[in-house]
Image: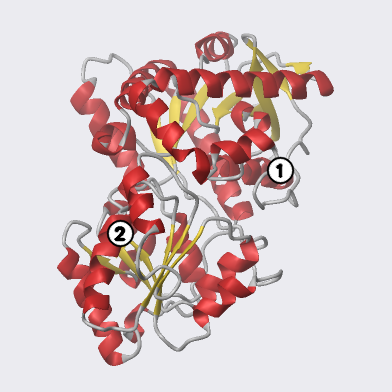
Amino acid sequence: MKPKQIYIECTPTYSTDILTGIQRVVRNVIYEANIVSSELSVQVIPVIFQGGHCYALESSVFDKHHDHSISSNLLSRLLKSRHVISIKDWLRRYASFVFVLARKMYLYLQLKIKSSEASLQDVRFHGGDILLLLDGAWGRPIEKEVTSARTSGAKVIFCLYDIIPVSHSNFCDPVKTADFKKFLKDMLMLADGVMCISKAVENELIAYQKNIFPQLKTTPLIDYFHLGVDRENLSSNGNVREEVAIVFQDKSPVFLMVSTIEPRKNHAFLLDVFERLWSQNHQVLLVFVGRVGWEVKELMRRIDLHPKRDSLFFVFHDLNDAELSYCYSHATSLLFPSFAEGFGLPIIEALEHGLPVIASNIPVHREIGKNLLMYIDPNEPETLMTRVLKILQNEKVDERYIPNGFQWMNWKEATRELIRKLLVMSSQLEEKK
């Protein structure tokens, strides 16, 4: 039986102007779902949770041409500012609950303001409907809304982006890890299905469930889909500041890292290797692109005070899409030595620009990059050193790793895949009754 409606829950994204990670996924999927749903004979409706109830939004709630530059919202900008990084570190380390509470209060107030300005319609679920929790579901009370939807006959499916807080807890705050463990247990008990963003995450969730919760009598169906690439926004059109372009005007090789600066991304590893290269008088450039994350106070001090800063080592926290595209198009290689990922979108973006990639040898990178990537051990500097030196000696990347004509699915194709898999999962759940 085909579901009557697919409801996509997007409360946190609707409540904030932040446009990174999950928020970009939610915005793109909801926009494209409004287009592809007709060909799949279903209706897709974005919804929010508020006060224990579920409310429908207009299908056009997220504009495709929303400004993807840094948010003009003052608090959003403040929370991402390097100037308060030490305060945020202190709050996370010594009083994490204060930070979490403040963030929840901010999102709640934002939601109340937006809700008062919109005409919200109460959702009544029916048998055959699907409720997809596409937004970040952990760390917020959703049990009442989820239980109500299931009681009404809807199939509840969670989207899972990764299980890093439990699989790599050494990179996360203990409070965050504890909250995430509780969320995973609640999800496995409440969900009819779980849709992961990669096969690697699906495998990790299955293994985690078997090892940690083998006593569960019933478990949700688990599948995966792949995220899309925003080819329209990540284009070469737009202004590129001189301070960005000038980095690539020299003929020296430029190695690029695109990522939020946080411990699991392994920026310190890159600095260690390039400091060795610079000490050997190699004229090679390293560029970090990404906002400042968490637990990086000492690393940011090292970055800000580095003697090669603005000569052989460059850092940009605020690139627009055109500038990021320029970096991809003019660099020698992307570096992505992360210890853990749910997907790894910068790898796809780099390959789409024809940029070779050196990445850590982890399952999800093998899944999306296959034999196109140059793999390294993220714990062994020598493996990266060898790769970079070979490129420097040959004055080019081995042709095997130059991704000519590489094309990943766009967001319309990714959304179509997601909806189709939701329909299949719904049918399988009906058969299990």
Q: Quadrant of residue 383?
A: bottom left
Under circle 2, the secondary element is loop
Could you tell me if residue 396 is visible in this image? yes
Q: Earlier in the sequence, mark 2 or mark 1?
A: 1
Q: Which residue sits at x=72%, y=50%?
A: 67
In the picture, the quarter occupied by the C terminus is top left
Q: Which residue sits at x=39%, y=34%?
A: 89
From the viewer's perspective, is residue 96 above or below residue 381?
Answer: above
Q: Amino acid at mark 1?
A: Ser
Under circle 1, the secondary element is loop
Which one is nearer the viewer's eye here, 355 or 215?
355
| Left/right of residue 385 with respect to residue 222 in the rendered view | left
The label shown at residue 72 is 1
The image position of residue 192, as x and y in percent, is 45, 22
- Protein image colouring: secondary structure
From the viewer's perspective, is residue 397 above or below residue 34?
Answer: below
| Left/right of residue 168 with respect to residue 418 in the rendered view | left
Could you tell me if residue 119 is visible in this image? no
- Within 10 Å of the Cα at label 1, are there few (<14), some (14-19), or many (20+) other Cα atoms? few
Q: Amino acid at mark 2?
A: Pro
Residue annotated with mark 2: 337
Q: Quadrant of residue 240?
A: bottom right
Q: Which residue sits at x=72%, y=18%?
A: 112
Which one is nearer the viewer's eye here, 130 or 235?
235
Q: Quadrant of residue 191?
A: top left
